[in-house]
């Protein structure tokens, strides 16, 4: 049973525009959420995280929004750059365990 | 220095053979995680180590899978009698203290691509 879902397998955006990647989760016990970025033939790299006590966290061009009532989070990248082209995974965990639950990923292509 | 390393980067094996995958975590990281990613799937948690002990083995898919960690450092994931459905990318990650969240960032290795013919 997939507890973290990324329903869009791919997304294409023009350079300079905003990229919005979405993630939904089912477990209301999740209290920590992360986004990872993965290039081909490399392991995922940590991008940005958010605790459930916040609804927004910003780091440069990257902002993560959390809507707890909807069990939904999103990653905004603005402005998008060709180097942002990668697969983005969202992940979630709860304070009752050590597991991180990952989504299936969204492949972002930023078109120059 | 170095990040998480994994070996081999690619492994092709015949069905029924045993394979051993290795992970070298970041020096000083006490927590180590194994995941696998099958085609079109997300990252599937396999096992978590805190030091040399594995408090959470819940993700191991069958008793053909086992893992150990020695000296609080290197870990090996062993798959016995491999099956075609074991084909996947096996990823290892380490983190500083293994609290599992709230700032305990996992650093991933490049993965081992396992193909079972």
Image (tube, helix red, strand yellow):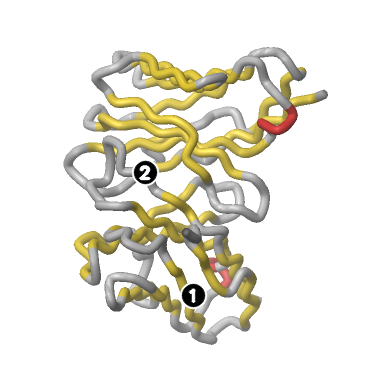
Nearest the camera: B106 or A33?
Answer: B106
Q: Is residue B94 left or right of residue A27?
A: right
In the rendered image of this protein, does residue A45 appear above or below residue B19?
above
**Residue identified by numbered label 1:** B21
Name which residue lies at 32% across and 76% down. B68
Among numbered discs 1 and 2, the one appearing first in the sequence: 1
Quadrant position of the C terminus of chain B in the picture:
bottom right
Q: Is residue A101 left or right of residue B58?
A: right
In the rendered image of this protein, does residue B75 appear above or below residue A39?
below
Q: Chain of mark 2?
A: B
Could you tell me which secondary element the residue under label 2 belongs to?
A: loop
Task: Tell me the mark number nearer the camera, choosing from 1 and 2.
Answer: 2
In the rendered image of this protein, does residue B105 appear above or below residue B37?
above
Q: Chain of mark 1?
A: B
Q: How many residues crowd mark 1 within 10 Å: few (<14), some (14–19), many (20+)?
A: many
Badge number at residue B105: 2
Name which residue lies at 25% across and 27% down. A28
């Amino acid at each position: 049973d997939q507890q973290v879902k990324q329903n869009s397998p791919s997304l294409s955006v023009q350079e300079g525009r905003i990229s919005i990647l979405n993630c939904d989760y089912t477990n209301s016990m999740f209290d920590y959420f992360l986004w990872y970025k993965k290039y081909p033939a490399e392991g995922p790299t940590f991008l940005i995280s958010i605790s459930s006590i916040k609804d927004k966290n910003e780091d440069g061009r990257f902002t993560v929004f959390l809507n707890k009532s909807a069990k939904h989070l999103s990653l905004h990248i603005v402005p998008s750059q060709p180097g942002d082209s990668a697969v983005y995974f969202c992940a979630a965990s709860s304070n009752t365990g050590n597991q991180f639950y990952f989504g299936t990923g969204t492949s972002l292509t930023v078109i120059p | 220095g170095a990040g998480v390393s994994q070996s081999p980067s690619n492994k092709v094996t015949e069905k029924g053979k045993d394979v051993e995958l290795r992970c070298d975590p970041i020096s000083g990281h006490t927590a180590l995680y194994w995941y696998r990613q099958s085609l079109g799937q997300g990252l599937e948690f396999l096992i978590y180590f805190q030091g040399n002990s594995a408090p959470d083995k819940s993700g191991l898919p069958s008793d053909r899978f086992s893992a150990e960690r020695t000296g609080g450092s290197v870990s090996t994931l062993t798959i016995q009698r491999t099956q075609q459905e074991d084909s996947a990318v096996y990823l290892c990650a380490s983190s500083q203290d293994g609290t599992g969240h709230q700032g305990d960032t996992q650093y991933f290795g490049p993965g081992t691509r396992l193909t079972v013919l």
